[in-house]
Image (cartoon, helix red, strand yellow):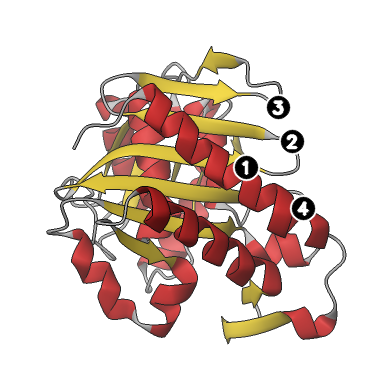
């Protein structure tokens, strides 16, 4: 199956409708009983996550009845569904609210993420930003674009490479074991500026649009990374797991670095990860 710009725009429309109907009305209006912890106080799920995933999944199944749909909240109950991404003819991967901690904390840094996987390869990604009304869209072989609230598009492009001391970026040391964890935390002092947005949707936006040079971390969950990696690559960037291998659907470990080009990736791997 092939996807066109029109197909991807239709998927963007699904995310926009879910955000308008299920997410925006609940932003900064959540009651305590509408927020629950999953694994920790930093790993949350809200009524909006569940409702948005339900609406998006229903729309996808109506449009593509043969597809496998992997949603973050469904996978939290049954992690085995991630394995279906390897051999599926067509699959969609949903993060109904990426940055749930921010959303539940009344901070506007969150997004809705959707990846399209065809025969084990991610071929498209859409990230919608409900507060601004924008969407970041990538289609394999066709580039990436940022679409504003008026549906006007402009190309997305990664930053030009610069020396390490001039870079802006972040390697998250969460989920890293010692001694790597402490080493990475210390090595981040080598760059000009670092940040941690607690939201993959926004971190991929800043690197795919050239506002920062690199991001990365240890944990790989498909709803957090598939769409963003595809969009970043189509914006001219380079991504690979920490051992240099390609990141593919269904992978959940091995870490990741996303950079403007291979040389920058190698520099980050050497100077920040360091082992």
Q: Position of residue 243 (x, y in %)?
A: 18, 52
The secondary element bearing badge 3 is classed as loop
Which residue corresponds to mark 2? 132
Q: Which residue is nearer to you in this view: 169 or 113?
A: 113
- Callout 1–callout 4 Cβ contact below 8 Å: no
Which residue corresponds to mark 3? 149
Q: Nearer the viewer, mark 2 or mark 3?
A: 3
Of marks 1 and 2, which one's residue comes earlier in the chain? 1
The secondary element bearing badge 2 is classed as loop
- Callout 2–callout 4 Cβ contact below 8 Å: no
Real-space CA distance between mark 1 and mark 3, rounded to the nearest whole angstrom:
10 Å
Q: Which residue is nearer to you in this view: 127 or 1?
A: 1
Q: Position of residue 1 (x, y in %)?
A: 18, 38
Q: Position of residue 19 (x, y in %)?
A: 67, 50
Of marks 2 and 3, which one's residue comes earlier in the chain? 2
Of marks 4 and 3, which one's residue comes earlier in the chain? 4
Q: Position of residue 184 (x, y in %)?
A: 44, 56
- Callout 2–callout 3 Cβ contact below 8 Å: yes
Neighbour class for label 3 at 10 Å: few (<14), some, many (≥20)?
Answer: some
| Residue 24 marker | 4
Real-space CA distance between mark 4 and mark 3, rounded to the nearest whole angstrom:
14 Å
**Residue 68 falls left or right of residue 104:** left
Which residue corresponds to mark 1? 16
Real-space CA distance between mark 1 and mark 4, rounded to the nearest whole angstrom:
10 Å
Real-space CA distance between mark 2 and mark 3, rounded to the nearest whole angstrom:
7 Å
């Amino acid at each position: 199956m092939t996807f066109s710009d029109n197909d991807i725009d239709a998927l963007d429309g699904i995310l926009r409708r879910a955000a308008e109907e299920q997410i925006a009305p609940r932003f900064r209006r959540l009651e305590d009983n509408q927020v629950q912890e999953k694994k920790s106080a930093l790993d949350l799920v809200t009524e909006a996550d569940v409702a948005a995933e339900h609406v998006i999944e229903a729309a996808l199944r109506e449009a593509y009845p043969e597809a496998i749909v992997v949603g973050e909240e469904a996978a939290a109950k049954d992690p085995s569904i991630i394995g279906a991404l390897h051999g599926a003819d067509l699959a969609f991967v949903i993060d109904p609210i990426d940055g749930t901690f921010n959303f539940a904390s009344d901070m506007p840094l969150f997004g809705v993420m959707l990846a399209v996987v065809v025969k084990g390869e991610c071929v498209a990604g859409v990230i919608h930003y409900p507060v601004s009304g924008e969407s970041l869209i990538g289609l394999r072989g066709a580039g990436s674009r940022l679409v504003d609230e008026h549906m006007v598009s402009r190309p997305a492009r990664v930053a030009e490479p610069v020396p390490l001391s001039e870079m802006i970026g972040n390697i998250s040391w969460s989920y890293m074991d010692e001694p790597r964890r402490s080493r990475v935390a210390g090595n981040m002092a080598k760059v000009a500026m670092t940040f941690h947005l607690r939201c993959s949707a926004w971190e991929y936006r800043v690197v795919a649009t050239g506002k920062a040079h690199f991001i990365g971390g240890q944990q790989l969950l498909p709803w957090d990374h598939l769409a963003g990696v595809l969009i970043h690559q189509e914006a001219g960037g380079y991504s690979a797991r920490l051992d240099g291998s390609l990141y593919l659907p269904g992978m959940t470990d091995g870490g990741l670095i996303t950079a403007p080009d291979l040389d920058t990736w190698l520099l980050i791997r050497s100077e920040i990860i360091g082992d």
